[in-house]
Amino acid sequence: MERITVLNGFVRPDFRGVAQTFERQLPRSQPGGAALCIYHRGERVVDIWGGSRDRAGMPWTADTLSLSFSTTKGVVSTLLHILASRGMLDYDTPVSHYWPAFAQNGKAAITVRQLLCHEAGLYGIRSLVKDAAEMRDWPHMLQLLEQSAPVHRPGERNGYHALTFGWLVGGLVEKISDKALAQVLREELTEPLQLEGCFIGVPDAEMPRCADLITPEKKPRDPQASPRQKKGPSLQQRVIDRALRLSGFDPDSTREAMVPHGMGRFDWNTAEARKACIPGAGGMFTARSLAKIYAALGHDGAFEGARILPPGTVARLAKVQNTSRGAVVPLPMRWRMGYHRVFTTGPRTPHAFGHFGYGGSGAWCDPSRQLGVGYVVNFGTGTPFGDMRLCQLNTAAIRAVDSLPRLLWQWVSKRGRGGA
């Protein structure tokens, strides 16, 4: 079957390098697709998509929804900041003030700020649930986290709450607003920004728009293999783990935060998983919707006449809260309140922030460049914070923006010499 790799959409000429990078990343002989949207100074300069949304070759379209994993965390964090901007919570007040049942087992003093900065010590998911299927049960997960205990004294260090973050922050949004998370998302972001594809729990009517997550097919086990060959980490994984331990990092904490029992059986492509409220990993978005959210954040909280945050708010929520290497991720993420640093292959981004996801998706803004970016993809795996594809796209976008003054001067000079 011939794979669909046609690039669709719109690119402003001075951002064509971004489109070229994007197109090179689309698979040529394998299924998979992606979409990228970029706003600069409030103007949409890139809006492209291509490839397929499933293994059968169904074409990716402008309104295709894609599972975006941890990119969802940035969206949920934005909702909490909107509530905070209205005086409905204070970042340095204990979470238990708004969510009394949260105070159990040594959590009474954990603040909202510590929760947002991954300093609460509540990242353990592997010891929290018996099977990953439990993640689809929203009330059950909230109750488990109410009963949980921190693995270290809150505030003494950071550890990426890879999955638990969504129930912790999403649960706090519900407690403060007294509304379902999906309703808050609709009222505070989807409707004001006119987002056409932004869901944490996909409604039945939107299911046909969903792209399938396409992961490498597992090789069947060799029935003649010894029990030792069938079980346990590979030699490569053992070497990596040893190297990490020698550097002072414990890879077991990563598995505790990211790999609940039964995760290998959890199918993100089922309707049951897509409908579930899993705000740490289960958001289904279009690139356009993510780009609009971050275009607003990158423009001091306003976009196309809609204001989601008061002036000056973004600068406060984007302030770096910790710079040390965490207990779960072996590199400093420079956590803001619900967001992290932006990775590139070269250009510096000291003012940029956002959130990337396993599988390659990501969304971010750079207020200093008035740039908002949203990227969704359904093939590949990468790392918990995207992969090289996203870094390459980020680099191309920043270089396009940073070259604009030079390009404008060249155009003016050409006009001055009588050029067309």
Image (cartoon, rainbow, N blue to C red):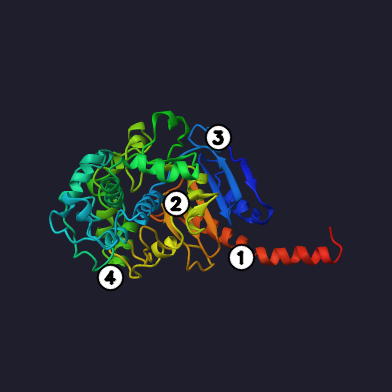
Q: Are marks 2 and 4 in contact (CB under 8 Å)?
A: no
The circle drawn on residue 241 is: none
**Cα–Cα gap, marks 3 and 1:** 33 Å
| Residue on which disc 1 sits | 402
Mark 2 or mark 3: whose residue is earlier in sequence: 3
Image location (x, y in percent) of residue 235: 32, 57
Mark 3 or mark 1: whose residue is earlier in sequence: 3
Mark 1 or mark 4: whose residue is earlier in sequence: 4
Give the camera-side residue of 252 and 288.
288
Q: Are marks 4 and 3 in contact (CB under 8 Å)?
A: no
Does residue 36 show up? Answer: yes
Dot 2: few (<14), some (14–19), or many (≥20) neighbours within 10 Å?
many
Residue 418 sits in quarter: bottom right
| Residue on which disc 4 sits | 248
Identity of the amino acid at label 4?
Gly
Disc number lying in front (1 or 4): 1
Q: Are marks 1 and 2 in contact (CB under 8 Å)?
A: no
Residue 13 against residue 66 in the figure, above or below: below
Identity of the amino acid at label 2?
Ile
| Residue on which disc 3 sits | 59
Mark 2 or mark 4: whose residue is earlier in sequence: 4
Disc number lying in front (1 or 2): 2
Identity of the amino acid at label 3?
Pro
Disc number lying in front (2 or 3): 2
**Cα–Cα gap, marks 2 and 4:** 42 Å
Identity of the amino acid at label 1?
Asp
**Cα–Cα gap, marks 1 and 4:** 38 Å
- Secondary structure state at the residue bearing disc 2: loop
- Secondary structure state at the residue bearing disc 3: loop
Dot 1: few (<14), some (14–19), or many (≥20) neighbours within 10 Å?
few
Q: Is residue 118 left or right of residue 340?
A: left
